[in-house]
Amino acid sequence: MLGITYFAAWEALTGHPIVENNMLFHPNALFPALALAYVGFTQIFEVTELDQYPIELRYTNEGEMKLERLKNGVSDIVRKVSSSTAEQKDNLDALDEKFDIYAAPKKLETALRSTYKYW
């Protein structure tokens, strides 16, 4: 109830709706991406006590292991995608030898241009 009262009072004071230009009230991908980044960051790192100098970031108990697993997962995905891309390129090259598919867009453009008269 206090939250609703606060919103109503804020709108009355400022003269425009509180949902205007507020990323929490409009659908977008920024807020979920920021929340996901925060959760991921806090799974790997922790901040030392704020009353001690210097303030530093440290790995959590399992932070190094999680970061290493993340790096390995990303490198595996990149390796799989690159090998799949090479396979697909070989398949397309074989189809090009049979059916000349790489020249098809140019042939289509030529055919379309021949149907129009230019001034």
Image (tube, grey):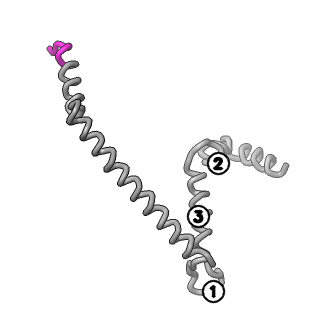
- Cα distance between the residues tagged 3 and 1: 25 Å
Which element is circle 1 on? loop
Q: Magenta: predominant secondary structure element?
A: loop
First reached walking from the N terminus: tag 2 or tag 3: 2
- Dot 2 corresponds to which residue? 24
Residue annotated with mark 1 = 52
Graded by Cα atoms within 10 Å as few (under 14), some (14 to 19) or many (20 or more), the crowding at tag 2 reads few
Q: Is residue 97 left or right of residue 88?
A: left
- Indicate which disc, 1 or 2, sits on the residue closer to the N terminus: 2
Distance (Cα) linking label 1 and label 2: 34 Å
Q: Kindly identify the residue that appears in the image at 26 percent across and 35 percent down.
A: 95
In the image: residue 48, left or right of residue 69: right
Q: Amino acid at mark 1?
A: Gln
For marks 3 and 1 on the same chain, the one whose residue lies earlier in the sequence:
3
Q: Which quadrant holds residue 51?
A: bottom right
The stretch drawn in magenta includes residue 24: no
Position in image of residue 92 (x %, y %): 28, 39
Q: Which stretch is magenta?
A: 113-119
For marks 2 and 3, give the CA distance: 20 Å
Frontmost of labels 2 and 3 is 3
Three-letter code, disc 2: Leu
- Residue under label 3: 40
Please determine whether, in this image, residue 17 is positioned above or below residue 72: above
Q: Nearer the viewer, residue 92 or 21?
A: 92
Please identify the quarter of the rendering in which residue 88 is found: top left
Along the viewing direction, whichever of 87 and 64 lies nearer the viewer: 87
